[in-house]
Amino acid sequence: MCVSMYSAVWSREETTERNYYTRYHNMSEITAWMEQMKRENPDVVSSMVYGQTYERRNITLLKIGLSSTGRKKAIWMDCGIHAREWIAPAFCQYFVREILRTYKTDTKVNEMMKNLDFYITPVLNVDGYIYSWHNESTRLWRKSRSPGTGGCTCYGTDINRNFYANWGMVGVSTDCCSQTYCGTKALSESEARAVTDMLGKMREDILAFLTIHSYGQLLLVPYGHPNISAPNYDELMEVGLAAATAIKAVHGMDYTVGTSPDVLYANSGSSRDFARLIGIPLSFTFELRDKGEHGFELPEDQIQPTCEEAYAGAHHIITYAHDKAFYSYAATVTATLWTTLLAAWVSSAILLTIICLYKKVK
Amino acid sequence: MGWTLLILLVVLTVVHGNPAVTVRTGSGPTVGFDQHPNSVPLGEGTQTTTEGESKVVEEVMTTGVLNPSHYPARRAATVVQHYLNTRYGSPYRWIFLSTVHSGSAEDVAETGRKYQLELTMQEIISNVSGQCSAELFFLGGEGQSAPQVQASCEGLLQSNTTAQEEAFYQQHRASNNLVSGNNIPDSYGHMEPSMKPFWQLGGVASSFIMLRESNESTLYNMAQVANFTQLVSSKEETEKDQLRFNYHVLLHEMISQEITHWKLLVTWSPEQGVKVLQTELQPKCHHCEAPPNTTN
């Protein structure tokens, strides 16, 4: 009886312990954690099931923000589109914990929670993630878990090659056994459809789209096709480079910024490209630690420093997106006010000068 | 009074501005479809292929000065990393690329491409860094041929690994206690401290394969030591002082994202360094991908 009481207390308090965020968690733990986030923060956290995986599991996001009466702008973040990149869902959990921990005391985070809603999907490829936890031999699974078609006995489509964004053009394979298999057609995967539908509904409100991966220490900007540039490439690079500077300031780690075809490889059908194509101006892929020493199997003692630096980078991009949307209007108003004031001063100064001179002449 | 007003007017003109963020032209979130001529409207450009092979994009090979943060320099630099490990690696010396400073590439008439790179490499066990100059030659044409590499480094091999290597060597030389291990690192990135030198040795041994298999369209890393087993030292005269191991490693190739399985026969001693006697690519198990019969 004592043992079972102790273990009940232990599991209840487990997620409040600091070392919860320094370990990897399986899907049922993450699901329980999402429930806990809602329970502990009912006025700012709600959840939304926005799709089903191939194996009919829910794809769930947490919507985090201070409630308001009007329609709010949004920030989108998704993690775990590739199953083996375990550091990504760990980062989504860390990010959620961090904004919930700081929004009451940090004026900037508080302001952003007022003006924005954060839509965060801790694990997008739920089937793949669960499969990667099955045993050591499945740890390096990447794709979805939909079966192959047309006599191909392999499983899975690369969800990040399956979006309707130059689908099938470059950096993909048509072999269903390949890790970059783009599927039988664009949006053949229900996971990709779920994101597509959500983004479609929300696209006028989303200020920034961040999709989290590993490894390589990169910040990738659209597009994945070598011959196509985003119209705001300069802005994306400027913001990305500033984010990389913020990342480096935390633990000295270098993150390289550029388009995927420039710094990594060409690819098409990615969620980042789709987000940019439908008009979301700031769309980034984060490739977290490391650079190949451990690769996908990043040691748990690196979870915290990786999340700290990634948070600094994400925070920079989100702050930029927020300020651009909310301060630009104010700046225009202020500029107009100044201009009006100055015009008033000029006219009255000229008038008074003329009167003075006239009086002098007289 | 008039002068005061004039001065005020000048001051106001100079001070004119606004306290908030500079208004950028064309600012505000772009809404709706981009009308930029470069954006590809949805629905265009679907690719059709009939064969089930991987599509290879005809990459336009960069010639001349290379951008150090772009992939051509980085892939070539990683090949240099593999080369350095084959030459100098050990259970206590494992080298990784730190920074690409500069590079250039040129076509060599009809035969291939030559790269020149200035790099910083880091020995990750002792944390010592060194500057390296390297030249690589990738043979073009049909068939896979290992790249040829020359490199000279300053300061990289400073760390004194002799004591550790000697102790490790003596510890495992006795044949009555052959060591083995698996899943290094494990799914959580953990490994027993006693397994760490075997992980490092596996990484160095893998460099022989990664060097041989590399070309301008690959970027290799060792993902994991699936298992290793120490073998009784060979009775052969030339090999009897070497530690001997069978290794099964998983390599990750970044561009294709494939994981390949390799078996290697590895020998090592402090004097002879790491040697790879045999390598064997393991076939992919496609039927192993079927869903397990468990619910989660």
Image (tube, coloured by chain):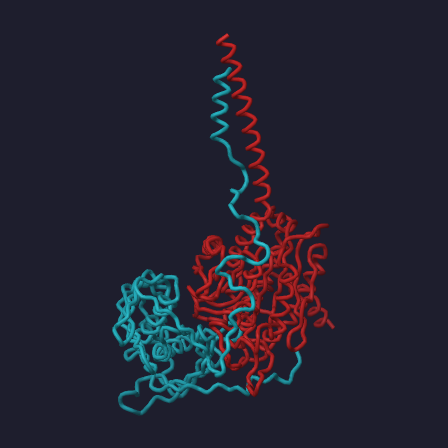
Chain colours: A red, B cyan
Tell me which residue sits at (54%, 67%) in the image.
A165
The image position of residue A342, as x and y in percent, is 54, 29
Foreground of the two, B133 or B138: B138
Q: Is B202 above or below relative to B15?
A: below
| Residue B216 visible in this rendered orientation of the protein | yes
How many labels sit on residues?
Answer: 0
Tell me which residue sits at (48%, 69%) in the image.
A267
Foreground of the two, A268 or A256: A268
| Residue B194 visible in this rendered orientation of the protein | no
Foreground of the two, A302 or A57: A57
Q: With A103 as the anchor, is A291 left or right in this view? A: left
The image position of residue B67, as x and y in percent, is 36, 61
Q: Is B10 above or below relative to A205?
A: above
Foreground of the two, B113 or A225: A225
Q: Quadrant of residue A57?
A: bottom right
Residue found farthest to the right: A1
The image position of residue A143, as x and y in percent, is 55, 75
Tell me which residue sits at (30%, 67%) in the image.
B105
The image position of residue A290, as x and y in percent, is 46, 66
Q: Is B237 above or below relative to A251?
A: below
Q: Quadrant of the C terminus of chain B?
A: bottom right
Q: Is A28 above or below relative to A358?
A: below
Residue found farthest to the bottom: B235
Tell me which residue sits at (27%, 88%) in the image.
B238
Residue found farthest to the top: A362
